[in-house]
Amino acid sequence: MGIPYRDQARRDRGVNLGDAPVHQLRAQAGEDTIRERLRQGRLPREAAQLVSAGAGSGLPCAGCGQEILHTDQQWECEVDGCRLQFHQVCYLVWDEERDRTER
Ligand SMILES: [Zn+2]
């Protein structure tokens, strides 16, 4: 009775706000994929060198696997001589997760 409804809503909001600022962007969907790929070694843990940032080229994102649309920001980096394309948000998530899982 009473307020469980509102209680639940507040708890949900608390969870979201408690996380890192990147999470407030629209990375939620890709985030699990990125973490999973890091765990499986499908994404490098080495520090990447950012090569370019610009409009999406339509290539699949190395993080979430979704196409990087022309309306998205695409960040391209180089790791071990390999070029990787990311959504801007995915790059940030990857960068953060890479750091976290290393320790
Ligand atoms: Zn992505």
Image (tube, rainbow, N blue to C red):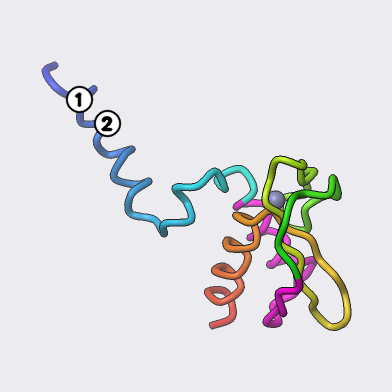
Q: Residues within 10 Å of mark 1 (few under 14, many from 20)?
A: few
Q: Quadrant of residue 86?
A: bottom right
The residue drawn where x is 87% and y is 75% is: 82
Q: What x and y, as percent, mark residue 66?
A: 77, 44
Q: Which residues are magenta?
A: 31-51
- The amino acid sitting under disc 2 is Gln
The reply, left or right, for residue 31 in relation to residue 8 is right
The reply, left or right, for residue 8 in relation to residue 82 is left
Q: SS of the residue at dot 1? A: helix
Q: Is mark 2 within 8 Å of ligand 1?
A: no
Q: SS of the residue at dot 2? A: helix
Q: Identify which residue, 87 or 56, lies in the foreground.
A: 56
The residue drawn where x is 14% and y is 22% is: 3
The residue drawn where x is 76% and y is 73% is: 51
**Which residue is at the far top?**
1
Q: Quadrant of residue 29?
A: top right
Residues under labels 2 and 1: Cα distance?
Answer: 6 Å
Residue ID for mark 2: 8
Residue ID for mark 1: 4
Q: Residues within 10 Å of mark 2 (few under 14, many from 20)?
A: few
Q: Is residue 61 above or below residue 71?
A: below
Please state the total of marks drawn on the protein image.
Answer: 2
The reply, left or right, for residue 23 in relation to residue 81 is left
